[in-house]
Image (cartoon, grey):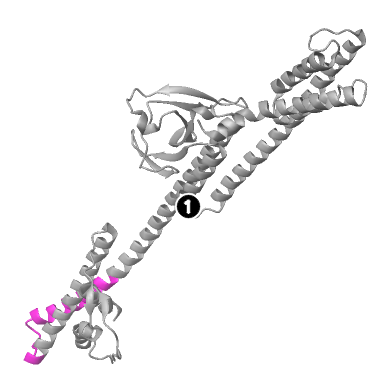
Amino acid sequence: MDPLRVRAALRTPLIGAAALGAATVIVAVLQDRLGVPTPSSVFILAVAAVALVGGRVAVLVAAVLAFLLYDFLLVDPRYAFTVKDPGEWVNLVLLLAIGLLVGQLAALLRLRQDTAVTREREARALFSVSRELATRPSTLAVLPRLVAIVRDEARLTRAYISVDEGGANRRVVADTGRGGAPPEPPGHRVLRRRPGSEPAEWVAVHTGKRLGRERTGPGTETYRVAMMTGERPIGSLWALRAREDGPLGAVETRLLAAVADQVAQALEQDRLTAAARDAEVARRSDDLKSVLLESVSHDLRTPLAAIRAAAGSLIDEDVELAAEDRRATAEMIDREADHLNRIVTNLLDLSRVEAGALRVERDAFDIGDLLEGTIERARRRFVDRRLEVALGDAPPVDVDAILLDQVVANLL
C-alpha cells in the first residue's frame, strides 16, 4: 500500500489521540496542582482540533472519549465510571453537549471550506479547458493538454479521448498513457445522462470480450463518457482510476461530463468549418472553371480560324500561291496546330492536378540551358515581337524540366 495513503488514513486518529492526551494532562495539572475548579472545558479545544482535521464521525468519537476520559481519570472516584458528587454530572453532561456542539460546528465549517476549495478547483479546471478550446489552432492540437487536465484534477491513472471512425473502429487522438491505443475493456462504467437537472449516474456495462488484466492494469476501474452532437456519437472520453482511490465522485463526474461535451462541440465545429471551407473551395473552383472554359473557348477558336483560313487557301484551286507563300501558309498551320496541342496539354495537366495524379520529377538544371528551347520556340512564333533574356549568373534550380517549360511557354 502507498505510504502516503497510509499516512493520510492515520492522520485523524493520531491527531485526535494527541489532542485528547494533551487535554487530559492539562486538565490534571490545572485541577490537581493549581486547584482550578472544573477545568473540563479544555477538552472542548481538543474536540475542536479533531473537527478541523476529521469529519462528523471523528468529532462524535472525540467528544465521547473526552467525556469518558474526564470521568474515568479526573472525577472522584478516580479510575471508575461512577460519579460521587452529583454536581459533577452537570459538568460531564455540559462537557459532552458543548463538545458535540462545538465539534459539529467546526466540522461544518471545515466541510464548507473543503466544498469551497473543491468548487474553486473545479471552476479553475473548467476555465482552463474553456481557455484551451477558445484559443485553439485546432481541436486535435489541444486535446493532449485537456486529457492531462482531466487526469490531474480527477486523480486518474490515465485519461484518453477516442473518436469513432465508423462501425466498431475508433482512433485514439489524445492519451496521457503510453504503449499505444488501449483496447475497450470487457467491463467498464458508462455515464448515463438524465433529463433536466437530475444528476447523471454511472452504469456498469459488459462487452463480452475477454481481456487480460495486464492490458487495463490490475486494480483499475474504467469509466467512459460518450461525446455526442445531438443524437450522433462522435467519440468517447475514457478515464482509468485506481480502485483504492474509490469511485468517481460528483465533482469528478461533472468535470468529465463538461469536458466531453465541450470537446464534442469543438470537434463538430471543426467539422462544420471544414465542410464550409470545402464548399467555398468547390464554389470558387466552379467559378474558375467557368472563366477558364470561356477563355479556352476563345483560345481554341483563334488558332482554329487561322488553320481553316490557311487550309482553305491551300485547297482553293482558284488561288494561285507561290512556293514561298505556300510554305509560309503550311508553317502557319503547323504553328497554330502546335498552339492547339499546347492548349489541350494544359487542360489535361489541369485535370491531372485536380485528380492528384500529376507527378513532379525534380532535378537540378542550369536555368539558361533549360529555357533555351522554350525561348527559341517563342522567337519563331512571335517573329514581330522583341524578346530579350537576362539571366545573369543564375544558380542551378531544382525543378521539373517539362513543367517549367510549360510554365514559361504559357507566360510568354
Residue type, mark 1 in image: Ser
Residue drawn at (76%, 16%), measured in percent from left and top?
Answer: 64
Q: Estimate the x, y position of residue 363 in percent, counting from the top left.
A: 22, 74
Vertical arrangement, residue 346 with respect to residue 209, above or below: below
Q: Estimate the x, y position of residue 26 in percent, counting from the top left.
A: 83, 27
* Foreground of the two, 170 or 357: 170
Residue 310 lies in the magenta stretch: yes
Q: In the figure, is residue 40 to the left or right of 54?
A: right
| Residue range (magenta) | 298-324
**Local secondary structure at mark 1:** loop
Image quadrant containing the C terminus: bottom left
* Foreground of the two, 313 or 152: 152
Residue 36 lies in the magenta stretch: no
Residue drawn at (73%, 34%), measured in percent from left and top?
Answer: 113
Number of marks present in the image shown: 1
Q: Estimate the x, y position of residue 163 in percent, counting from the top left.
A: 41, 40
* Foreground of the two, 41 or 341: 41
Q: In the figure, is residue 315 to the left or right of 393?
A: left
Residue drawn at (79%, 13%), measured in percent from left and top?
Answer: 72
Q: Estimate the x, y position of residue 52 in percent, counting from the top left.
A: 74, 31
Magenta-drawn stretch, dominant element (helix, strand or loop): helix
Vertical arrangement, residue 289 with respect to residue 210, above or below: below
Res 141 seen here? yes
Asked which quadrant contains residue 352, the reply is bottom left
Identify the residue under disc 1. 138
Residue drawn at (45%, 43%), measured in percent from left and top?
Answer: 176
* Foreground of the two, 79 or 88: 79
Circle 1 packing at 10 Å, graded few (<14), some (14-19), many (20+), is some
Asked which quadrant contains residue 181, the reply is top left
Q: In the figure, is residue 267 to the left or right of 340?
A: right
